[in-house]
Image (cartoon, grey):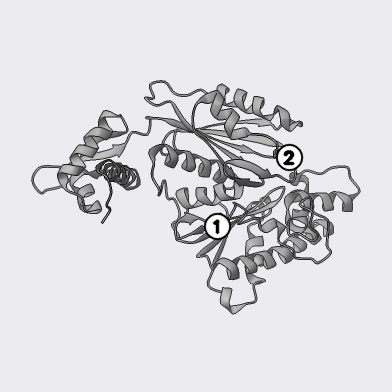
Amino acid sequence: MITGSKELIRDINTNLVLETIINKTAISRAATAKYLGLTKATISAIVQELINKKLVIEIGSEDTNLGRKPILLSLNKKAGHVICIDIGVDTISALLSDLIGEDCSLKQIKTPKNPYNLVGELIRLVESMKLPKGSPFGLVGITLGIHGVSADNRVSFTPYYDMSNLNLAEELNAHFNTPIYLENEANLSVIGEMTFQYDYTNIANISIHSGVGLGIIIDHQLYTGYNGRAGEFGHTIIEIDGRQCPCGNKGCLEQYVSERTLLKKFTEKKGLDEVSFEYFRDMYEKEDPDARDIMKQFVKYMSVCVNNVLNAYNPDIVIINSLFTINFPHITDRIEKSLSSRMNSYVKIVPSVLQDTSILLGGVCVAIKGFLGINYLKLNNIHE
């Protein structure tokens, strides 16, 4: 039983009611009381307060043959809006969403070459996104996804685009007067997968872009470690005295499997100045020997990576988010077959269906939960 001051207990109960309504999609007052073990009077009072605040709406009656039809409740998805911004090395993507991850709009801009111009670009980007009219609360939160390490809502380390001297969250909060959440992109990606895609208790999401990150869900909760560095799997060493990494170590995983590294190696093999992923894909499909060698390296080192993830975290599922697994789904099967340990034969290994959208959707989830004061959010589960 929860004990404490009346105000604290009421706040906790209010958050529980709101969490139940949004996760159940549509539920009556009586069903909410039964589900939470609270009195009908308590539920009625809390629901009325939420309706007065325009956070909850009545959406009609439940179809039942037993007596009076109970009125169903739902979250007012238009009560507020959130934005998630994925700050990539080359491209910045921003997603505007309502409070259930629907009615979304996407904008993209080039990442400024000078990081000191970043704050201004982000402000202009947010201001260019048109919020729907009639929202009682307006913009209620912005999530920033960075490709690096974050701690205490600040950037600690970004290997390929240095933002460590920028106070992104503070400056955006001062300008927009709304909560700013700053999080590692791999963490946002796994939150997006859990919220919108997979219904598993323990999830590992390997995110491969310019670097390699690992998002970890344990018992439905994001695991970040002591100072936010959990999941920096790209900086685990797999080759002693191997290739130099911007982090200062040698032989880091991302120097062997990141998209940036593999495309650079393919470029060198072809004697070209630069190649696009599309060019690499075309050459691979034409069975180009150099492209095939690159993919052999990817499978080799990713098999080691996945094996280590399985033994370290014992997840229900491993999701791989990479252009290589998205465009060549059979690569995931090759990685799975390369896992020789019988201990790991049970696990489900899949390419991400949400792809890079998982980062943006994860950020949407973070901002929604922050605004509503809830701990658990499950939306649009489209794959079990």
Other-residue count near label 2 (Cα within 10 Å), few / some / many at <14 / 14–19 / ≥20: some
Residue drawn 23% across and 38% down?
Answer: 46
Residue at the extreme left: 67
Q: Is residue 349 above or below residue 175?
A: below
Q: Nearer the viewer, mark 1 or mark 2?
A: 2
Are the residues flagged by discs 1 and 2 in contact, CB closer than 8 Å?
no
Q: Secondary structure at mark 2?
A: loop
Mark 1 or 2, nearer chain start? 2
Where's residue 81, x and y in %? 45, 31
The quarter in which the N terminus is drawn is bottom left
In the picture, residue 306 is in which quadrant? bottom right
The quarter in which the C terminus is drawn is bottom left
Where's residue 203, x and y in %? 52, 59
In-image side of 345 versus 70 (left or right): right
In-image side of 150 versus 279 (left or right): left
Please state which amino acid type lies under the numbered disc 2: Asp
Q: How many marks?
A: 2
Q: Secondary structure at mark 1?
A: strand
C-alpha gap between disc 1 and disc 2: 24 Å
Residue 62 in sight: no
Disc 1 designates what residue? 216
Q: Nearer the viewer, residue 219 or 378?
A: 219
Where's residue 167, x and y in %? 63, 34
Residue drawn 88% across and 53% down?
Answer: 269
Disc 2 designates what residue? 162
Q: Nearer the viewer, residue 296 or 358?
A: 358
